[in-house]
Image (cartoon, helix red, strand yellow):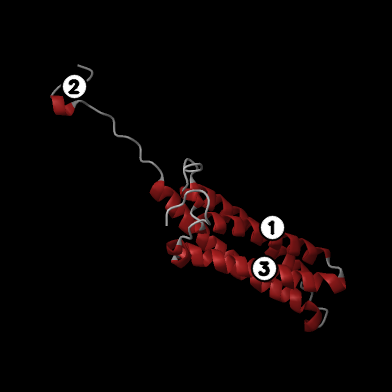
Amino acid sequence: MEQNGWGPPAVDLNFLKSGLGVLKIVQMILSLVGFIVAEITASPYNWEQMKAFEWISLIIFILTLAVFTIFLASWHKSEAVIRCNWPLVDFWHSALCTVLWSINLILGLISISWRYRLFREGGAIAGTILAIISLLTFWATVRMSYRRWHLFSPTPTIPYHYQHLGTEPYS
């Protein structure tokens, strides 16, 4: 399907079926579930840690949705943004989200207190488990995007030594 600028963007089904596409979908689902769990947990008990967990999860969801949309709609292949190093953008996005999920993991661990019953701490425990799983998925994405970044990075040029002419350049 050729785009002339007026129709809907073409969907890259190969990206959707790739490991990176599946990881992005899983990451968005985990971030959204983390946001919902933190919202439910933070509201009745007024826990500041879970409110921070909630906002960080929402920020991660929005960032991941933006990167997912760019790759799914093949906007990274358009002529307007072709000069951007998209594997590097994906690497930095994944690295930033890994750091944010590490903060969420710490917040979830702080929220867990063994003094109370499980029904009160269930949200904090679920948030901590979600943070661990999300941290692992983003770490896998960091590794994949790092490899893609170095795969597509330009190789240094080999100096031209005039060997095909039979003469040395500095003789």
Q: Is residue 98 visible?
A: no
What amino acid is found at the position of numbered circle 2 in the picture? Glu
Q: Work out whether mark 1 precedes mark 2 in sequence or the reverse, and give the earlier one.
A: 1
Residue 66: x percent and y percent? Answer: 60, 55
Rate crowding at label 2 as few (under 14), some (14 to 19) or many (20 or more) other CA atoms within 10 Å.
few
Name the one closer to the observer, 113 or 3.
3
Location of mark 1 (residue): 59
Location of mark 3 (residue): 32
> Does residue 157 lie above or below 169 as drawn?
below
Identify the image quadrant of residue 110.
Answer: bottom right
The residues bearing labels 1 and 2 have C-alpha atoms spaced at a distance of 59 Å
The residues bearing labels 3 and 1 have C-alpha atoms spaced at a distance of 10 Å
Name the one closer to the observer, 11 or 57.
11
The residues bearing labels 2 and 3 have C-alpha atoms spaced at a distance of 64 Å
Task: For marks 1 and 2, give the one nearer the viewer.
Answer: 1
Which label number is shown at residue 168?
2
**Where's the C terminus, which quadrant?**
top left
What amino acid is found at the position of numbered circle 1 in the picture? Ile
Point 56% across, 50% down: residue: 92
